Image (cartoon, rainbow, N blue to C red):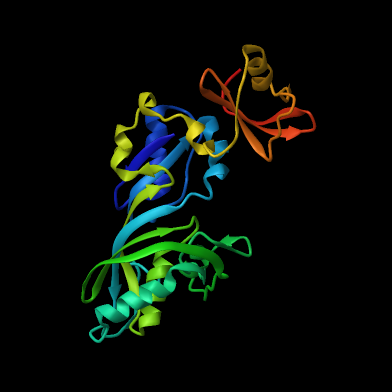
Amino acid sequence: MALVAKPAGPTSHDVVDVVRRALGPCRGGHLGTLDPFAEGLLVLVVGRATRLAPFAEGWAKMYEGVIRLGVTTDTDDATGAVVAIASPGLVTATQLVATLAGFRGAYLQHPPAYSAVKIAGERAYRRARRGEVVAPAARRVEIRELDLVEYAVPDVRFRATVSSGTYLRSLARDIGAALGCGAHLATLRRTRVGPFALVDAVAPTAVTAAMLLEPAALVANLPRRELTAEERDAVVHGRPIHLVPGTRYPEAVGLFGDGHLVAVAEAVGDVLKPRLVVVDA
């Protein structure tokens, strides 16, 4: 696992490719896309650790950025074509603060037309690029924190903590609509993903195998079981091990050997069955 500081410009997939070339042949992915115009923390998972990505789906993400009032675009960010212009001059700081407060908590959010959300099996952005009218279905997201940092018309500098799957472009669009003047997301920087911070990240070209983090961080919330040498050998070969008498596990369990994550297992009857093995035999 690697903490990468994505610059504005390349896609998240481009960044993954750069890191994979540096590390040699391996599988690779990330824990949440950043749009090309955005910058900030991209948490990469490589090798067998990619299989652990679902355990990080609930991690919150923190951002800082700028919403530009008065200009609406077809992509909901600064890269798109302008579709509407209105004066934001009458929007007061008091009104803005109240509007931001109204978005805190859970709300149903429509992803942007230009997004990777699938509609009838096809990415929404591909349909939008063909000129189709695209309206992705709304989904529940949570805005855990949304604070005004600075308001200098027409720019709103903000800080936000949101649930996974939240589109900050959509949030900017919806805030503009609520204010009656329209808006788009002008800049965006992701500063944190779960327990990881941007200040600890490195440039994509600086990633080396020696600096990869232990994948155990992805399952830190799971119960933990230390393995004997005999149990470790069984687990890496996919064989179940017996539960310690009197032990009960509600769901998945992280299995560790010598302090390193070996596998994630599931309690079935009186045994633990390995489901995801992350080390070689």
Please report the residue visible at 39 percent of the width from the left and 25 percent of the height from the top: 209
Residue farthest to the top, as pictured: 229
The answer to whether 65 is drawn above or below residue 11 in the figure is below
- Across and down, in percent, residue 92 comes to 25, 82
Let me know if residue 163 appears in the view.
Answer: yes
Horizontal side, residue 198 vs residue 247: left or right: left
Please report the residue visible at 73 percent of the width from the left and 22 percent of the height from the top: 239
The answer to whether 16 is drawn above or below residue 25 in the figure is below
Quarter-of-image position of residue 240: top right
Let me know if residue 78 appears in the view.
Answer: no
Q: As rendered, which of 6 and 218 lies closer to the eye? A: 218
Quarter-of-image position of residue 90: bottom left
Please report the residue visible at 74 percent of the width from the left and 28 percent of the height from the top: 246
Please report the residue visible at 42 percent of the width from the left and 53 percent of the height from the top: 61
Horizontal side, residue 102 vs residue 127: left or right: left
Residue farthest to the left, as pictured: 152
Horizontal side, residue 132 vs residue 6: left or right: right
